[in-house]
Image (cartoon, grey):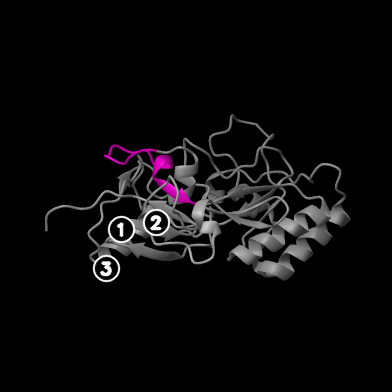
Amino acid sequence: MADCGDGLFDWSKLRDAPLTLGYAQTRHLVSFKLPPNVTLAAFDRALAAFGRVVGKEWVLATDEDRGTYEDIYALQGDESHEPAAAVAPASTEEVQAIVRLANAHKIPFWPISRGKNFGYGGSAPRMSGTVVLDLGRMRRILEVNERLAYCILEPGVGFYDLHEYLTSRKIRLWMSIPGNGWGSVIGNALERGFSATPYGDHTAQMCGMEVVLPSGDLVRTGMGAMAAAPPGLCSNMGSVLPRTRCSPSRASGS
């Protein structure tokens, strides 16, 4: 809990929100802007196609939805980063399908992990009229290996999520947590985030990634690209697995 002047703010609201939802009520509703060179009819067809992949409820295209992804640090009246809509896939396959549909319908998109790594990057797109590809629903912690001190995460996993996973299972690994602990672990590392721990350079601790290319094809970095990759997962010089963030620091004491 933190003192916000007129009372206490419950930070768990930021921790628990699966997407960036939660800021719209404190900001003005943004105006609707279409993607460049896309008609309203064509845009509606694209949104309908997205909905057939992720479900209609995860195509976020109301005024309030758009306000949710606004740049909360923008100068007053800045309308250069307003999204046209957002789409929230729940799996790698859905991400691939959305990227291919965006190509087919000529829709620009802006991918975010959780949109909460304030100070490094936010949820607002670089260009107005862009569709935000919100990966916040992808919150699975696929593996934590205590002996080798690595974890395999999806992009929507926040620092709170990982901390609760470790403590609830009494896993004796020491997390490196930045000031904005409600942000994405992967997103923070990709934005060159850091903290004051021995392994605080989060980017340097990444061992491999699973990446959806602009074509919709999937690529895995390093030896994670091999079927039956060897178990040497804690090296960012070679042996890796997809969606992996390696943090070799181990908790000491009881």
Number of numbered discs overlaid on the protein picture = 3
Q: Nearer the viewer, residue 101 or 145?
A: 145
Assess whether mark 2 and mark 3 are in contact (beta carbons under 8 angstroms). no
Question: Where is mark 1, residue-wise?
Answer: 148
Report crowding for label 3: few under 14, some 14 to 19, many 20 or more residues within 10 A (C-alpha): few
Find out whether residue 49 is within the magenta segment. Answer: no
Q: Could one spot residue 14 in this view of the protein?
A: no
Q: Which of marks 2 and 1 is nearer the N terminus?
A: 1
Direction from residue 38 to residue 168 in the image, left or right:
left
> Type of residue at label 1?
Leu
Q: Can you tell which of label 3 and label 2 is closer to the viewer?
A: 2
> Type of residue at label 3?
Arg
The stretch in magenta equals 194-208
Numbered circle sitting on residue 169: 3
Question: Where is mark 2, residue-wise?
Answer: 233
Direction from residue 129 to residue 14 in the image, left or right:
left
Find out whether residue 198 is within the magenta segment. Answer: yes
